[in-house]
Image (cartoon, rainbow, N blue to C red):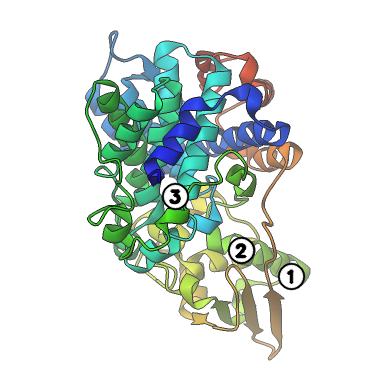
Amino acid sequence: MTTVSQRIADFASALTWDVLPAAVREKSKVTLLHNLGVALAGAPLCEAPLRYARALEESGTTASARLLANGAAATPDTAALVNGALMHARAQDDVYFPGLTHAGAVMTPAVLAVAESTNAKGVDVLTALVAGVEAAAALCQGWGVTSAQRGFRPTGLFGVFASTVAVARLMKLDAQRTVNAIGIASNASAGVAQSWVSSSQEWQFHVGMGARNGILAARLAAAGVTGAPDAFEGIAGFYRAFTGSSEGSDKVAWDLGTTWRIMDVTYKPFPVCAILQAPVTRAIELAIQNDLKPESIAAVRIHLNPIEAAIPGTDVKGPFSDTGATLMSAHFCVAVALSKRGVQGTDLKRYSDPILEGIIARSSVIADPSLGTRSFVLEVDRTDGTTLRHLEKTVGEPFNWNRDETVANLRRIADELPLGEQQFAVFVDTVLNAEKHSAREIVDACVAGRT
């Protein structure tokens, strides 16, 4: 019987653009557009990673990649790290809910960094991205939740495999070297969730480090370094280490190439945690429909599935000193939505806002076992004695947008993008036709000030 890594490697190394279903091709471009768009909007919340890049002062022939938005030259490793942080700065990047993993945000910066340095074709970029997301999604489906309950962050753990497999495909590594790359990557996988509780900044680098480490794993494999072929199911392997058991690993990745998990990748309308997208959306609607004023809110109750209510950071009320803590806090995000009737990236920095603090003090998160995942109840008591209540039982993927919906959402946050109207149109057209462009042309479209 083949190993998990071998099944993934056989699929990824043989994947070509022409065999992909039309819907998968389209989804790959729409996902790329969304992720690049939120990365461009992420710069105001990404001071530390950008400061790190400036301090390196990289230049010369080794600085063969660029940072998104400002276009600064960087080595592929630095570009992957910093662009990953940019893409994740608003926590608005794509998500694969069955595994609680932001695969696209980890692999896209890595692939673009390597592809730009070699002037690869856009069609090869897209093919690599499909390979990466399918691999990571197969690996984390059902396992991400288990690892999260043990204090690990699924994106930090599983995202590196998206990056590794995608870069290996871009580099055209054969199946055996891809197996080695995956084995190596299992030793470069990391991420714990304490950052959101402590209001510190390492959460922002989980994505970037996964991107950079994926490049490293693929390069080491290309150089002949070997990796454990049974990295996942082995007695001392990945699944046992991070989830406590490898039971069920024999069923992982058999359906690659027939089941396309990229079709279940969803997006986020607001810069808040994935599980808070729908509650924030409904809070905004309640505030508008009922003309809610902050001073008229007596109490707020947010009922969540117990697993989601227990996600580190969800039930934190402050004090806040980093956007990672605010975007994870159900109290904070719903308070912004109710008081402002919308949420922008800059709202995440309202650490000591008296209006928000007042609502947060009167709010509570309730673990409700009657609710399924991503279902919730939002209750708002008003000072006049009445209560507004919304129950939502989520079915399917509510934010699985097509290209028109994705473009519409980017237009909605256009004032947060560093692009003028003309450049925005070029950006959208270039990415949605990425198979006709080079990697450098795709990055060109993401540099502010270019036309």
Distance of mark 1 from mark 3, alpha carbons? 46 Å
Query: From the viewer's perspective, is the residue at label 1 or at label 3 nearer?
Result: 3
**Closest to the observer, 379 or 247:** 247
- The amino acid pointed to by label 3 is Leu
* Sequence-wise first label, 2 or 3: 3
Please indicate, yes or no, whether residue 338 appears anywhere in the rendered image: yes
**Closest to the observer, 450 or 230:** 230
The spot of residue 226 in percent (x, y) is: 23, 32
Asked if residue 66 is positioned above or below residue 401 in the image, the reply reads above
Quarter-wise, where is residue 422 in the image? top right
- The amino acid pointed to by label 2 is Val
Check disc 1 and report the residue beneath it. 291
**Label 3: few (<14), some (14–19) or many (≥20) C-alpha neighbours in 10 Å:** many
The spot of residue 271 in percent (x, y) is: 53, 51
Query: From the viewer's perspective, is the residue at label 1 or at label 2 nearer?
Result: 2
Does residue 233 appear to the left or right of 346 in the view shown?
Answer: left
Please indicate, yes or no, whether residue 78 appears anywhere in the rendered image: no
Check disc 3 and report the residue beneath it. 139
Asked if residue 444 is positioned above or below residue 11 in the image, the reply reads above
The spot of residue 273 in percent (x, y) is: 50, 58
The spot of residue 418 in percent (x, y) is: 55, 30
Give the residue displayed 50% in from the left and 36% down from the top: 39
Secondary element at image label 3: helix
Check disc 2 and report the residue beneath it. 280
